[in-house]
Amino acid sequence: MKQFIFDTPEQTKELGQRIAQGLTAGDVLVLNGDLGAGKTTFTKGLATGLGITDVIKSPTFTIIREYQGGRLPLYHMDVYRLENGGAADLGLDEYFEGDGVSVVEWAQFAEDELPDDYLALTFKRTGQDNQRQIEVVPKGGHFVALMEEL
Ligand SMILES: Nc1ncnc2c1ncn2[C@@H]1O[C@H](COP(=O)(O)OP(=O)(O)O)[C@@H](O)[C@H]1O
Ligand SMILES: [Mg+2]
């Protein structure tokens, strides 16, 4: 486990950019934390790190947005609106096993659908205005090496 404390959105994006460097096709990142904690901000940095130039918008109402044009495709999912179930019908495994990188916001609402290996990030406000705490935990063996690079 690694823990980071950041004072600006730029720092959170920079972590996303750094993590992007080590990602390969089929990698899955799950992001948990309250509304406004910084999950989408992190994903913007990740997209930049993959070389995606499109503006990343929160996929809350669309559930899944796909971005091409980078080193790998990015599948950005926000399953918040599936709070009462429904994640099983989305066919998330098609994305997880695909040729891109999948990022799932509010992953606790899709817990049963998650693969064996994923990188789990938990975002928290610390109480100070713009400060955020981000915990990074590798689930399964696949992300252990990437973690050491962080
Ligand atoms: N240190 C920080 N890291 C990330 N976001 C921050 C930080 N400080 C302030 N913010 C702001 O908090 C908001 C986070 O929103 P967002 O990333 O959409 O959160 P979430 O996707 O978790 O709901 C943004 O407006 C962002 O600019
Ligand atoms: Mg979000």
Image (tube, rainbow, N blue to C red):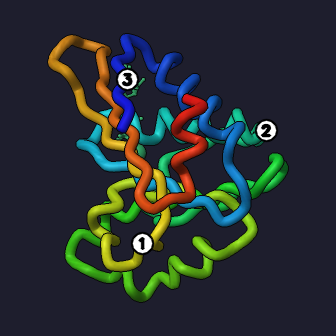
Identify the mark at residue 4; answer none if there is no mark: 3
Count of numbered marks: 3
Q: How many neighbours does mark 1 have within 10 angstroms: few (below 14), some (14-19), or many (20 or more)?
A: some
Q: Earlier in the sequence, mark 2 or mark 1?
A: 2
Disc 3 residue lies near ligand 1 with CB under 8 A: no
Q: Position of residue 104 (x, y in %)?
A: 45, 58
Q: Position of residue 129 (x, y in %)?
A: 24, 12
* Marks 2/3: CA–CA distance: 24 Å
The reply to whether dot 2 and dot 1 touch (C-beta < 8 Å) is no
Mark linked to residue 114: 1
Q: Nearer the viewer, residue 98 or 62?
A: 98
Q: Amino acid at mark 3?
A: Phe
Q: Quadrant of the C terminus?
A: top right
Point out the image quarter for the N terminus.
top left
Tell me if I can see residue 60 in this picture. Answer: no
| 84 sits to left or right of 51 | left
